[in-house]
Amino acid sequence: MTEQNQIKDTFGRTHDYLRISLTERCNLRCVYCMPEEGIKLRNKSHFMTRNEILSIATTFVGLGVKKIRLTGGEPLVRKDAKEIILALGKLPVELAITTNAILVDQFINVFKTAGLKSVNVSIDSLIEERFNSISRRIEFQKVKKNIALLIAEGFHVKLNVVVMRHVNEDEVTDFVRLAERENVHIRFIEFMPFDGNKWEWDKKVSFNEILSAVKSEFGDDSIIKIKDQKNDTTKCFQVENFKGTFGIISSVTNPFCGTCNRIRLTADGKVKNCLFSQDETDILAAFRKNEDIEELIRTSILNKKKERGGHRDFNDDFVEDMKNRSMITIGG
Ligand code: SAM
Ligand code: SF4
């Protein structure tokens, strides 16, 4: 792989991290992700088959992609998730997954065989009733058990928590406390606007508020800033003497676009060059017509805007005019 062959945008950012959504379906209905009325389920032919995922992923690897994260919808509800994970595990990439963990116990050995070591799990409350109300399903116990299983089995486990005003903001410090004895990494995510999730500026809890809550609980002096990784979207910290860490993803109040290296491939085979971009490039249609998808991928990334898909900030106009997909159909 020469540097010339890598996927670069006009701002000099190299794109070597691909997030593949395996499905738009899910066994939860999280309020911030899935519109209340649900989403229109489409015929299977609209979505990438296992072989198409593999071939397209292999093309990306040829263009310098070094990391692939599987997401969704819930990636593990896909019937051939096992075969896809095992096949992608053979590519020369770091393979990771973001999951709600409900089915994780059935996949532990698949993860191990595929060499998948890093698992991000979404959990927005440690209070059973609240978790069930946010996710509109009754799966708390299963999720909790499977997080414990992942930790016991030695996976690198991050817990994704979308922090929402008057919903779970009072649990920030309880989540951080989980990292006291367990090697677990808490990632607080500012609530972001997507189609159908009734986002309002006041519903997000900001980076500053989250950090202040942790500082006032554990003491200003015990919070250690950890050096950020090159393309990390998270500002990472550790409470002194804690085993795990915590971090904040501030896409709303302080975006991290400057070092973005991410490309998203939706389950229906569209390349999205940014979570917030409205442009999509239909790689799957081109692939099915035997067209050159490398050129399409490069062009999509060349069209990438500097910040947040070209939106300067999330003001009311942006939210009103938003013609983005709902998160469940993007793959977070
Ligand atoms: N089903 C899997 C899960 O929940 O982990 C993977 C897909 S989910 C769309 C990926 C991530 O996006 C989750 O961590 C979820 O919390 C996050 N997410 C979804 N909607 C969001 C929103 N409106 N704001 C911030 N994060 C969001
Ligand atoms: Fe499903 Fe994940 Fe969206 Fe929740 S956040 S509805 S688990 S895809």
Image (tube, grey):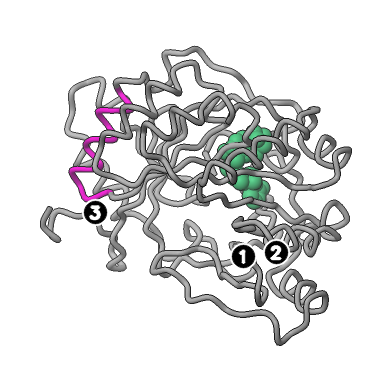
- Magenta segment range? 52-65
Q: Quadrant of the C terminus?
A: top right
Q: Would you place residue 261 above or below residue 94 in this image?
A: below
Residue 40, located in which quarter of the rendered image?
top right
- Residue occupied by mark 2: 180
The residue type indicated by label 3 comes to Ile
Q: Quick one: label 1, few (<14), some, or many (20+) residues within 10 Å?
A: some
Identified at 37% across, 31% down, the residue is 113
- Residue 246 visible in the current orientation: yes
Q: Quick one: label 3, few (<14), some, or many (20+) residues within 10 Å?
A: many
Disc 1 on helix, strand or loop?
A: loop
- Residue 323 visible in the current orientation: no
Q: Earlier in the sequence, mark 1 or mark 2?
A: 2
The stretch drawn in magenta includes residue 259 = no
> What secondary structure is the magenta-colored segment mainly?
helix
Front one among 205 and 239: 239
Q: Would you place residue 209 above or below residue 101 in this image?
A: below
Q: Find residue 118 and report its horizontal and vertical position in percent.
A: 47, 47
Q: CA distance from mark 1 to mark 3?
A: 37 Å
- Residue occupied by mark 1: 243
Q: Earlier in the sequence, mark 2 or mark 3?
A: 3
Whether disc 2's CB lies below 8 Å from ligand 1 is answered no
The residue type indicated by label 1 comes to Lys
- Residue occupied by mark 3: 7
Disc 3 on helix, strand or loop?
A: loop
Disc 2 on helix, strand or loop?
A: loop
Quadrant where ligand 2 appears? top right
- Whether the residues at callouts 1 and 2 have beta carbons within 8 Å, the answer is yes
